[in-house]
Image: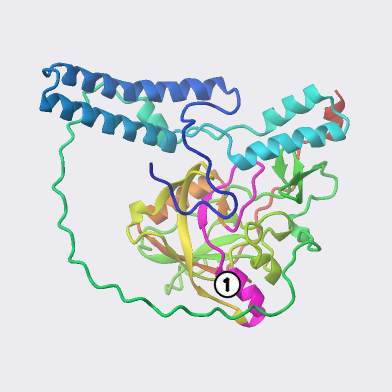
Amino acid sequence: MKMSRYLCEGKTAEPRGRVLRPMRTDLAACRAALAVLLAYLQFFTAGVGLAQDQAPGSSSAAEAAGQIADFFSQVGDQIYEDCIFELSQEQIEIQQALIVAYVKAGASSSVARKLAVKQIHPPKLSAKCEQIRRMPKQAAPTIEEAPSPALPAEKPVIAAIPKIPAKPTGPAISVANKKTLPQWDCAPGVDFVTIQLNGYARKLTGGEICNPFEDVVHEVSPAARSFRLGYTIRTGRLFIVSDDPQLRGQTIAWAISGREMCRNNPDPDCLATRAVGPLPPGEYAFNSPIGDQRITFGPKTKRNVAGIYLTKLWNKDKFTARQTAAILSRGNIAIHERLKGEMSEACLGLEAKGWAYVAALIKSGRATGVNAYVDEPYPQVAENPPIVVASSFSLTSLFK
């Protein structure tokens, strides 16, 4: 089964054997997933009929059975990739931590569980999954064997002389005493509970992080056929990088990068801390030169992602040798949708509509790469972050 290399930083991916076992009771999602499975089973049943028409033990029957097995293997993989209805691993951890926090705040265990499950729920089925679910019955596709490609001539391998890495210098890297930047902290008068996640404190109000971005999208002019995406680490703004003065700096959407006290915090220690800090400043390339192959499935994130990798680090003069070495060792950075309650492990986490639009720009090949800046490079056209400050969550609801 295919697995994306761009999973964001942190834990390894979970096994993918649990194709249709929801982690939380969501009847509508279960029914939808079963409908998808039944749609694919129509292909499988038709293929079985073709195989049974052949004489037992014949080579054609064996070939048909092999085709059916290959097809069903691909089907299972596609169902898992296109029709995810489970909570992400981070959402599961948040849900469990919320229960503990609500009980500490005075709620009964029953109320705490109900509230956490209500607030942290699985994502909606993707549009592609809905399309698959509504497919009409049809016969199994004919699978033709492609000719084996000619093997290239082997070239002698010349072993390279290993380089002895220099020992990093400078003070130790630590984010223990860092604080969340004021613009990302809970606004005055907003009720919240504090959970502990992977050893760090996170404030949540109604199951959501404080001060998330609104799902704002500004479409790019159709005349702009090729441009790079720009991202300002300090503000979260995603924009156009182009030689065209009419397009340069135009806002596209807003994305979170980094988590807890390092959310959109360009502090060098944050940038050098794996799985916590935002993406480092510099130039990034997509993992594939072909647009429609740049969107792949991330088992850890349980959603589609666009993998990017650092090709040139900027602002090196601001980092110690130890910080530079740590920054360059970071990897598995991607652009993807952010689900409720989640933050980001170096990746760019967009809201649903923002991710859908940016993914379309990447698939079409219009977006050719990413530049990440510490501070706003186009202040004359930059907008203020569309932050959601208010919250309807009330601690007194825990005691009802």
Q: Does residue 194 show up?
A: yes
Query: Which residue: 87% across, 31% down?
Result: 396
Q: Is residue 253 above or below residue 111?
A: below
Q: In which quarter of the image is residue 38?
A: top left
Left or right of residue 154, residue 351 in this image: right
Of residues 371 and 241, the one nearer the viewer is 371
Please provide percent x and percent y for residue 276. Answer: 66, 58
- Give percent across and percent down for residue 339: 59, 42
Q: Is residue 321 inside the magenta stretch? A: yes
Residue with the mark numbered 1: 378
Q: How crowded is mark 1: few (under 14 residues within 10 Å), some or many (20 or more)?
A: some
Q: Which residue is drawn at 14% across and 21% down?
A: 57
Quarter of the image holding residue 391?
top right
Q: What stretch is highlighted in magenta?
A: 317-346
Q: Is mark 1 on a helix, strand or loop?
A: loop
Give the quarter of the image for residue 274: bottom right
- In the rendered view, tell whether residue 188 sits above or below residue 100: below
